[in-house]
Amino acid sequence: LKLDTSDVSAQAAGALKNASGSYTLADLNLDFTSPAIAGLSGKVAQALGPMDGQIAALDGPNGQLAQSVSGVVTRINPLLKLTGTDASVDANVSVDLGAALQPLLTGVYGNGAVSFNLQTGEVKVNLAKLLGGNINNEPVGTEVLSDKVVNEILTGITSTIDSLLDQIVAKAKLTLENASVNVDATVNALTAQTPLLGQTCVQGGTGTSGSAGTGGLLGGLLGGSGTLGLGLGGLLCTNTSTLLPDLKTALAVHVHVHGTVDQLVSGTAPAANATLTLLGLPVSVNLNDITTGIGTQLSDHLLVGTTGEPGLASSLNTNVLDPAVTGLLGSGSSVENALTKVLSVKLNNQSTATTSDGSTFTETALKVSVLPDGANSAATINLANATVGPNATTVVPGNPSDPGNPSNPTDPGSPSNPTTPGSPIIPTALGNLAFTGVGIAGLVSAILALLAAGAYLVREGYRRNGRRQIP
């Protein structure tokens, strides 16, 4: 905690029974550091942990995205699974939340009167600006760190942090919605080279023919009965035994899904497409269910629930906002209690004291007290004091019947020359007369000169009266 000011001064002025004072400060600043608002990057990274985990769970050949695709293509045929050595899967959500949020975490926040750094926890308060810029016109005994002012400072900080967390959540959501989602899968179902038993059929010489009895693999794919002929009447069939070619690539599917999280969740992403190869012949397959399944997975993992956007907001409140509120405004060893109960900073302090010669008046520009309890404190620092009090007294002539020799005006004992008043007697105090101390010497000289002139007039009056009395 640090309090600093510069060019501080105080002035005191007095009249016969009245005194007044004024003060000036060029500035007044309060700096303090609180761990409660420090280390924002680490706290946000901790809050992002569950969401980063969900992103990782979506990626990879065995992640949730790959499983969504696998569930759809497996319904085409049980042989088509995105697992095993014959599957090549690339599924990922391209996003870096930490990098996207970093600009929000490194700035200095505040409104000019109060600024703070959420990495270092340092808070800078321009008390002059906070008091409206009239720091030199405050009423007598103004407590700068009053409960109201301190609460305004700390509430402003916590409100700014709360607003910042809303910005972080909004930025994270926008970043996730614009994240690219890519799923590329290639699956090859391997079969051995086997003979195909069936029939060759001819219809009335038209040359249309087909094979029957394949069953199994193709039947599962196409849902047929195992007959690929046209099924026309009057077929002439003969039994055949044909050795099928190498079927390593006879059953393959290539799936491509590309879009953003928002497009896939809202259903506006480009339709997923797949190419199914049967016996070396490409067959177009519409996989609309894939985009729906991927959108559901993305929404469940990233946008809703305890691990999505609401979970991020809750985690930020727990890891960032709640500690800040407790550390700054809590009932225990908080910054608020430290500023209001440990430190007192008062402006324009005025006091009077009684001495043996009369009363004195003191103006103190700035008074800083540590552990004040109302009447006392552990330590007090007074910056810029000005005191006025009784420093001139009534002058009485030495002996009116022997006013001195007026024939020699240069004689120091002669009052005929008021500019050299000699050595007047200064007996009794004038009372409450007070002066600034700046012009005291000149003022005393003027008073003594006037008194000497008065003594000269008194002496001349005695002489004139003495002449009239001579017969």
Image: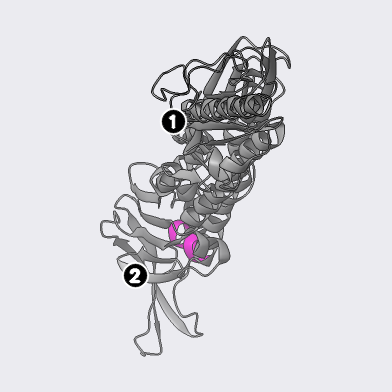
Residue 31 in the figure: left or right of residue 275: right
The relative height of residue 310 versus residue 124 in the rendered view (above or below) is: below
The foreground one among 384 and 132 is 384
* Residue 282 - label: 2
Residue displayed at 53% across by 48% down: 111
* Residue 270 - label: none
Among all residues in the image, which is located at the extreme left? 246
User: Residue 364: x and y, percent?
Assistant: 58, 26
Tell me the crowding category of disc 1: few under 14, some 14 to 19, or many 20 or more residues within 10 angstroms, Cα based.
some
Residue 356 in the figure: left or right of residue 440: right
Region of the chain picked out in magenta, as a range: 216-224
Quarter of the image for residue 18 reads top right
Quarter of the image for residue 434 reads top right
Name the residue that disc number 1 marks.
120
Q: Amino acid at mark 2?
A: Pro
Q: Amino acid at mark 1?
A: Thr
